[in-house]
Image (spheres, rainbow, N blue to C red):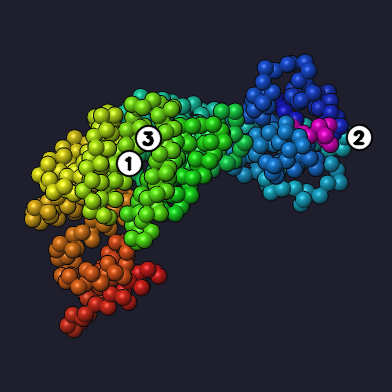
């Protein structure tokens, strides 16, 4: 293994030159920027990346180098800033101080306590460029380091190769397959600091979403964001963070019912994508942001709904216009936008009761159906929406047929769970309560398995309103239901309050007491 000397030419050039000469005179293979006039690499950034990644790095500490290491805003010397970012990434991939292939070299009188924390954890060597004092100890240390790190380097290379093999296998199977799901979980479990995983984020998150695993998407997003923020982005990789924010973090925050955070993350991802001219990701970010606003409108008080719907409509127009110019007017992306537009029109109909809005929603859904590919996840979501339109139009049997087909044929657990929930609404409309309760119980179980706790609690509450004895030992009256809905807008809080009363009732020795719902809701909300 060769040795690469990293330094700032503005104030560390003399020390680096003396260090390189001393090491070469002792038979060591040394690379440094002074060789560029001889080797003439095609790309200096690529040469830096390879040199830092594949060799032991000696960091010649100087004031300018420390500025570059501690902040990405150090603009005076862009080369050393980029090189220092690569060094940070190399340190990040190594645990502990011993055996790390990054060695800080400081002047004899340098106060080591003033080093940034990223270097303080490493083994530090002192070197005097005038007398060459300290070079012998450094050479011995480098020899020990090279001997001890042979196995580690091989292990890292094998780890990268293993990740690539696993990613190739994952991409060779349908996202909904069990094998792809198992590979995705394994990749995320071992993926801390793995740039290969971050670069293949789209493939892995597609598998996680196909299986509706909210926790897996959350963990994948966390791992990839941590990896990407640990180093400066290479050319062409700046937009990766935008993809993780839009397709990963915003997605799982929406399902966790954390709307404000989801909206903020979607907006941040959109801005990053625009910065790097990734127009497709920017359009997806606008659409994701619009979807969050639509959900906020569904949950909002009447006087706030119009604000959220106007924002949703504005962002959806921007996203649709972008996709039309990028992918063409008949693309799947435009179809997904049309489906979201139909869902927005359905909500407006539910707010106002204006029949024209329901007709317009049906027309938008028909446009989306013509653009989406049957059998895909967006197509199944559209079918669920069409069943909801049937419910609004009181075409209950037609709606039940639509969602029953989805339940039978769809390979996407979240879609199936939502289909069961919608079918339960249709069954209740035709007074088929036992069948509706059975669908709601199945939907609750599936949502809870997927990590969609809010959706699961919504199903639980729907069952409690129909027949609470299926869940607890007492029956909720109409007054109880109304009181709980007034006190707790979140069905998760209502469920916890009911379960708390159930627990208190089981321990009570005397007669049953009248529940104090205000007290119980207050306790669960402040637990």
Residue denoted by label 3: 206
Secondary structure mostly seen in the magenta stretch: loop
Q: Residues within 10 Å of mark 3 (few under 14, many from 20)?
A: many
Where residue 9 appears, x then y in whole percent? 81, 32
Q: Is residue 483 left or right of residue 404?
A: right
Viewer-nearest residue: 513 or 187: 513
What's the distance in space between the residues labelled 3 and 2, CA to CA? 58 Å
Residue denoted by label 1: 340
Where residue 377 appears, x then y in whole percent? 29, 35
Residue denoted by label 2: 130
User: Looking at the image, is mark 3 or mark 2 nearer the viewer?
Assistant: 3
User: Looking at the image, is mark 3 or mark 1 nearer the viewer?
Assistant: 1
Q: How many numbered discs sit on the rendered protein?
A: 3
First reached walking from the N terminus: tag 3 or tag 1: 3
First reached walking from the N terminus: tag 1 or tag 2: 2
Instruction: Determine if the magenta segment contains residue 374.
Output: no
Q: Which residues are magenta?
A: 6-13
């Amino acid at each position: 293994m060769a040795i690469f000397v990293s330094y700032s030419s503005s104030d560390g050039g003399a020390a680096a030159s003396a260090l390189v000469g001393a090491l070469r005179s002792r038979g060591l293979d040394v690379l440094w920027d002074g060789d560029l006039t001889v080797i003439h690499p095609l790309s200096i950034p690529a040469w830096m990346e390879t040199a830092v990644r594949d060799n032991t790095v000696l960091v010649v500490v100087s004031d300018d180098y420390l500025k570059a290491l501690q902040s990405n805003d150090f603009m005076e010397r862009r080369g050393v800033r980029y090189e220092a970012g690569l060094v940070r990434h190399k340190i990040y991939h190594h645990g502990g101080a011993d055996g790390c292939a990054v060695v800080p070299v400081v002047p004899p009188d340098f106060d080591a306590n003033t080093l940034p924390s990223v270097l303080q954890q490493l083994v530090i060597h002192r070197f005097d460029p005038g007398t060459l004092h300290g070079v012998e100890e450094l050479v011995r240390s480098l020899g020990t380091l090279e001997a001890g790190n042979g196995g580690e380097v091989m292990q890292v290379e094998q780890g990268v190769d293993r990740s690539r093999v696993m990613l190739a296998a994952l991409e060779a199977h349908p996202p909904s397959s069990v094998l792809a799901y198992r590979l995705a979980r394994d990749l995320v479990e071992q993926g801390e600091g793995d740039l290969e995983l971050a670069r293949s984020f789209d493939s892995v998150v597609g598998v996680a979403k196909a299986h509706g695993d909210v926790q897996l998407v959350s963990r994948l997003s966390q791992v990839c964001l941590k990896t990407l923020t640990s180093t400066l982005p290479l050319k062409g990789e700046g937009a990766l963070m935008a993809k993780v924010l839009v397709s990963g973090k915003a997605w799982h925050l929406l399902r966790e019912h954390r709307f404000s955070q989801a909206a903020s993350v979607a907006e941040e991802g959109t801005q990053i994508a625009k910065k790097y001219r990734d127009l497709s990701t920017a359009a997806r970010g606008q659409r994701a942001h619009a979807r969050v606003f639509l959900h906020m409108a569904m949950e909002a008080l009447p006087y706030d709904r119009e604000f959220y719907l106007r924002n949703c409509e504005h962002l959806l127009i921007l996203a649709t216009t972008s996709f039309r110019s990028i992918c063409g007017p008949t693309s799947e992306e435009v179809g997904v936008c049309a489906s979201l537009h139909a869902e927005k029109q359905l909500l407006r109909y539910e707010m106002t009761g204006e029949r024209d809005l329901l007709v317009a929603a049906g027309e938008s859904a028909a446009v989306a159906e013509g653009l989406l590919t049957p059998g895909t996840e967006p197509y199944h979501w559209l079918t669920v929406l069409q069943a909801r339109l049937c419910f609004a139009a009181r075409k209950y049997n037609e709606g039940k047929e639509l969602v029953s087909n989805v339940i039978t044929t769809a390979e996407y657990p979240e879609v199936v769970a939502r289909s069961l929930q919608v079918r339960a609404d249709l069954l209740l409309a035709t007074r088929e309560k036992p069948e509706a309760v059975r669908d709601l119980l199945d939907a609750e179980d599936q949502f809870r398995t997927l990590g969609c706790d809010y959706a699961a609690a919504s199903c639980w509450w729907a069952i409690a309103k129909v027949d609470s004895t299926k869940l607890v030992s007492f029956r909720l009256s109409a007054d109880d239901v109304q009181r709980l809905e007034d006190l707790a807008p979140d069905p998760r809080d209502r469920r916890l309050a009911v379960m708390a009363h159930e627990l208190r009732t089981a321990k009570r020795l005397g007669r049953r007491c009248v529940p104090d719902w205000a007290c119980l809701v207050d306790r669960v909300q402040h637990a």
